[in-house]
């Protein structure tokens, strides 16, 4: 079956523009995560949804970052007034169960590479 | 706060040699530890987790709470093992993963 998909795969934005990144999790997956991966670093947690509820947004770096998952499936990460430091790969992951204690852990998407000029 | 340290950015070994990718963590509770792997042009995927105590593709990792380590080992490296490896941690009842910076493993023929 299809895995986690993300679109667009690449996005170039001028500083100050707003961007929206989409994540389609695996069908039926309850949990959805967003991570930010800067060049040469490991992924860093941004936010977590359980169905449509955003249960943890402690990793969002500023109020310019906003995520939603209104119907408990597709999620959108929006970044307003992009800055150069927002340039990174944004990863989405989904998980079937409510916690990480499932045999297969989190399934990751291919990521969206955002470049802010 | 939780933290994961992978001290080596790059580990280069010859085919057939043993491999050990180091991972140390800091967390005061009982964490769950994972190894994720990313092969060239592929997405990040789970390799193994300490709670499973299994060997995947010949790799094993033992959680050493005394040394706060979760090193990844394989007795005989193969060229197809070349990839980026990330060690990650989650709290015992948490959901988010805390990743290390990753180690590139290059297996030379």
Image (spheres, grey):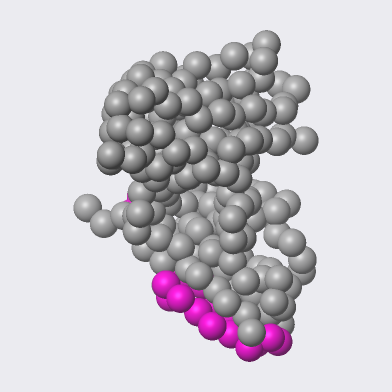
Q: Quadrant of the C terminus of chain A?
A: bottom right
Q: Give me the residue at 22% from left, 53% from top.
A: A1
Please, which residue is most extreme toward the top here? B66
The answer, for residue A68, to whether it is visible in the render is no
Q: Give me the residue at 49% from left, 57% from top.
A: A92
- Where residue A99 appears, as percent x and y from the top left, is 52, 35
Q: Is residue A52 above or below residue A106?
A: below
Q: Give me the residue at 43% from left, 23% from top.
A: B73
Front-lying residue, A105 or B4: B4
Q: Quadrant of residue A109?
A: bottom left
Q: Give me the residue at 50% from left, 70% from top.
A: A113
Front-lying residue, A71 or B86: B86
Q: Is residue B101 above or below residue A110?
A: above
- Where residue B4 appears, as percent x and y from the top left, is 65, 35
Residue B4 within the segment the image draws in magenta:
no
Q: Which residues are magenta?
A: A8-30
Front-lying residue, A84 or B105: B105
Q: Is residue B53 above or below residue A89?
A: above
Q: Quadrant of residue A61?
A: bottom right
Query: Looking at the image, how many numbered discs can be counted on the residues?
Result: 0
- Where residue A57 appears, as percent x and y from the top left, is 69, 54
Front-lying residue, A114 or A58: A114
The answer, for residue B77, to whether it is visible in the render is yes
Please, which residue is most extreme toward the left here? A1
Residue A26 within the segment the image draws in magenta:
yes
- Where residue B9 appears, as percent x and y from the top left, is 57, 44
């Amino acid at each position: 079956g299809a895995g986690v998909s993300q679109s667009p795969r690449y996005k170039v934005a001028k500083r100050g523009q707003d961007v929206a990144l989409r994540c389609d999790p695996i069908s039926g997956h309850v949990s959805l995560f967003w991570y930010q991966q800067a060049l040469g670093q490991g992924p860093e947690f941004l936010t977590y949804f359980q169905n449509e509820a955003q249960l943890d947004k402690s990793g969002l770096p500023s109020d310019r970052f906003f995520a939603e998952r209104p119907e408990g499936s597709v999620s959108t990460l929006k970044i307003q007034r992009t800055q150069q430091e927002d340039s990174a790969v944004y990863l989405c992951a989904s998980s079937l169960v409510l916690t990480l204690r499932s045999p297969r852990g989190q399934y990751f998407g291919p990521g969206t590479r955002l470049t802010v000029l | 706060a939780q933290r994961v340290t992978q001290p080596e950015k790059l580990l280069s070994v010859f085919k057939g040699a043993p491999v050990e990718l180091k991972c140390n963590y800091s967390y005061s509770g009982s964490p769950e530890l994972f190894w994720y792997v990313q092969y060239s042009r592929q997405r990040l995927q789970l390799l193994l987790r300490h709670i499973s105590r299994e060997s995947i593709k010949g790799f094993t990792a033992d959680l050493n709470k005394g040394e706060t380590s979760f090193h990844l080992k394989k007795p005989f490296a193969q060229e197809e093992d070349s990839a980026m490896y990330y060690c990650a941690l989650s709290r015992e009842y948490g959901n988010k993963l805390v990743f290390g910076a990753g180690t590139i493993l290059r297996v030379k023929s």
